[in-house]
Image (cartoon, rainbow, N blue to C red):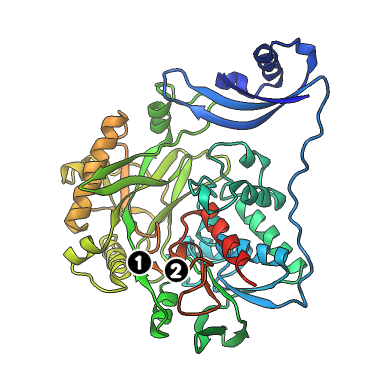
Amino acid sequence: MYKEIQVRMLPQDAGEEGRLKKVAAQSLQLALQRICRVDVVRRSIDARQREVVFNLTLGVHIDCIEQQEPCFIPKYQEVAAKESVVVIGAGPAGLFAALRLIERGFRPIVLERGKPVEERKKDLNRLYKTGIVDADSNFGFGEGGAGTFSDGKLFTRSKKRGDVRRILEILVHHGADARILTDAHPHVGTDKLPGVIVNIRKTIERWGGEIHFGTRVSDILIHGRQVCGVVAGGEIYEARHVILATGHSARDVYRMLYERAVLLEPKDFAVGLRLEHPQHDIDCMQYHSPQGRGKWLPAAEYNFVTNIEGRGVYSFCMCPGGVVVPAATGAEQQVVNGMSSSARNTAWANAAIVTAVGKEELNIMGYEGIFAGMNFQEDLERQAWQEGGGGLIAPAQVLTDFLAGKLEQELPSTSYKPGVKMSLINQWLPDLLYHRLSAGLEIFGKKAPGFVSSRALLLGVETRTSSPVRIPRNAVCCHPEVVGLYPCGEGAGYAGGIVSAAMDGEKCAEHIS
C-alpha cells in the first residue's frame, strides 16, 4: 500500500530516514515495522515562526514497496528527413521548442548567435581578465541563454502556461538533480546547468535536429504575409515556420523587425539596482537567529514586494550564497546580474530590487515611441558605465547612504569581481525611480529588521529583468500579420525565467502544423 501524508519536522530530523519512518508510522498509527520505505515527495521551509520547520509531503510504502510510476522519458523520434522549422535562439524557450518539435515530428534548425557553453565559459573568463565584452558571447548571449549563468532557478508562478512538472522532468532526464522535483523553490546551479544544456544539445542533434552557433540572424524573409525563412551568418535558411526566441537583450532583432514593418508593441518592464548583503545577515534575518542558519538549513532567501504610487517595487532573481556578475552585452554598458552555484555557499546574498516602468514614466523622462523603453535602458546603462569610470567597474553605494541621499560610508566587501566605485546613485538615477526604490527599501526594512544595513551594498544597474517590447501573437501563438512567425519566450514578452520560457517554447512548437 502507498499513501501520501503531510508532516512538519525540525530541520535536523527532516533528512534522516529512520526519523522519517517513525514520523510516518505515528501519523498513520501503524507499527514501525510496517513502514518499508518513505519518499520525500515535496519539501518546503516554513520560517514564519521562531522555530523553523520543514513542511514535507511523504510517500509512505506500507507492508511492501509499491511499484512507482516510471520516470518520465520524452518520446523523441528521428526527424532528419522531416520538415524543417527554424528556431532563432538557444535559450530555454528555443531549446525546449526544439525538443518538442522533435517529439512532434519536425526537424528543428536552431540558430544561435553565441557559442556553445564550453567556449562561452572561456569568453566569460576572458571578460573578467580584459574587461572587454564579446557582443555575441557573454552572460546574456550563448547556448542556454542568460539563465545558464544565473543560478538556474526553476520556480515559477506561471502554472497556467503549461505543465511545470513536465519541464522539470525533462531537465532531470538531461542530468539535473532529481531534487528539483520535490523542492518548493528548485534550482540547478550555475555549475551544473551547463552540463544539462550540453545534454539537451546532444539530444537535438542525435534525433536529426541541428544547432548552428555563431550564427546571428540579420534578416527575416517574408513573401506577402507568409514567412519563408531567415538570413543568418550570411546564409539563407528556408522554412515556412520560424520560432523567434531571441531573449530580451537582442535589441538588434527588434530593430530589424521594425525595419521590415513587423508589428511590435511597447510593454511595461522593470529596472533598478542589485542589492548585496552578507549571507549570514540574511540567514539571521530569515531564520530569526543570531547564529544564522546553522548546520541543517540552506542559505536563506527572501522575496519582497510592495506598491508605491500604484507601481510595484519588488525583489527579483534572488541568489542566496551567490555572486554579482557583469551582464552587459555590448560596449559602453554597465549591467549587473546575480548567480549561484548548486551549493549556494559563498559569503554573499544578492537580489535585484526593481520597480515597474511604463509609458507614463517614460514620457515624463522624455522617451516616446515603440523603442522608448529600450532607449531608456540603453541610456541608463551608458550612464552607469560612465559613473563606474568605464570598463566593467560598477557604481555602488552603501544601502543606508542611498536611503539618506549621501555618500559617507566606505563600501563593504563585494563578490563583484571587476570591482566597484563609490557613487552617489540618487544624483544620476531618475528621480521617480530613486523615490520608488528608496520608499520600497524602507518598507522592506520595516518588514524584516536587519535588511536595511550599512553592511549592504547597492550596485548599478539592473535593466535586463524583462523585455520593453512585445511582439504580438494570436491564440495559436502566430504573429497576427506574418503567417508562420511564432514570437516566443522572454524576448517576445511572454515569459520571465527559465521554466516559463521553456513552457512557452513548447507551447509555440505545439501550434505548428
Q: CA distance from mark 2 to mark 1?
A: 9 Å
Residue 79 in the image: x percent, y percent? 76, 72
Dot 2: element? loop
| Quarter of the image where one finds residue 326 | bottom left
- Please tell me which of labels 2 and 1 falls first in the chain: 2
- The residue indicated by pointer 1 is 333
Q: Position of residue 407 (x, y in %)?
A: 18, 46
- The residue closer to the viewer here, 111 or 472, is 472
Image location of residue 131, percent across then percent down: 42, 65
Is 205 situated above or below 35? below
Q: Quadrant of the C terminus?
A: bottom right
- In this rendering, would 146 be left or right of 288? right
Vertical position of residue 413 compared to residue 470: above or below? above
* Residue at x 52% of width, y 38% of height: 345
Rendered image: mark on residue 378: none
Residue at position x 45%, y 76% in the image: 253
Work out whether residue 340 can be spotted.
yes
Q: Name the quadrant of the N terminus.
A: top right
Task: Give residue 12's quadrant in the image.
Answer: top right
Q: Are marks 2 and 1 in contact (CB under 8 Å)?
A: yes
Amino acid under label 2? Val
Q: Describe the element under mark 1 as helix, strand or loop.
A: loop
Task: Tell me, yes or no, if residue 144 can be seen here.
Answer: no
Task: Decide which of 493, 174 is in the foreground and name it.
Answer: 493
- Give the class, few, some or many, for how many residues have Cα within 10 Å of label 1's Cα (few <14, many ≥20): many
Q: Name the residue at 23% across, 39% down.
A: 400
Q: Is residue 390 left or right of residue 466?
A: left
Query: Badge 2 is on which residue?
Result: 133
Look at label 1 and name its amino acid. Gln
Q: Position of residue 154 (x, y in %)?
A: 54, 47
